[in-house]
Every structure is written in C-alpha cells, then in structure tokens.
Amino acid sequence: MNNSQTRCLNCDRSDEEIPLVSLRYAGKQAWVCSQCMPVLIHKPQQLAGKLAGAEKMTGAAHGH
Ligand SMILES: [Zn+2]
C-alpha cells in the first residue's frame, strides 16, 4: 500500500496517468485530475467523503 503517491481525490488516478492539479481546502492539500475538475466546480457534493468538508460546498449555479 502506497499512500504517499499523488492521486486524484475523486478517481484515484496517479499523476503518471493524468495531469493532477494541486488544491488547498480547509487547510489540507488535495489533488484533483483535469478530468475531475468539472465535478469539483459544478458538483462538489459528489466529492463528499473524499474531500473533507466537500458536503458543505455548494455547486455553481445549482440549487436543491
Ligand atoms: Zn480524477
């Protein structure tokens, strides 16, 4: 098991497979790949449980 490798918080792909973008949120660092960036922007609730505090975010132009 290798937790030190940089992986997308959503799809778990490594930076050897896909470009990853560094994030900082709630004082923690996380990584998201170029493909999952739109999910983070528009549907952050989908990342609840993967990114700590994501359930508190609201998606852009999205209401319940
Ligand atoms: Zn991803």
Image (cartoon, rainbow, N blue to C red):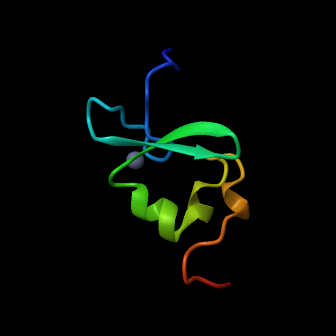
Left or right, 18 with reference to 59:
left
Residue at image location 70% in from the left, 46% down from the top: 26
Tell me which corner region of the image, top left, top right, bottom left or bottom right, holds residue 54: bottom right
Q: Is residue 5 above or below residue 43?
A: above
Q: At 52% from the left edge and 45% from the top edge, which residue is drawn?
A: 23
| Quadrant hosting residue 8 | top left
Q: Is residue 29 visible?
A: yes
In this figure, what is the number of numbered marks? 0
* Residue 31 position in % (x across, y down): 47, 40
Q: Is residue 7 left or right of residue 63?
A: left
Q: Can you give x and y, in whole percent of width and height, for residue 2 in the image?
A: 48, 16
- Rendered residue at 62%/64% (across/down): 45
Looking at this view, is 12 or 44 the one in front? 44
Residue 63 vertical placement versus 5 (above, below) = below
Which quarter of the rendering shows the C terminus?
A: bottom right
Q: Name which residue lies at 55% across and 77% down.
A: 60
The answer to whether 61 is drawn above or below residue 6 in the figure is below
Closest to the observer, 32 or 11: 32
Res 50 seen here? no
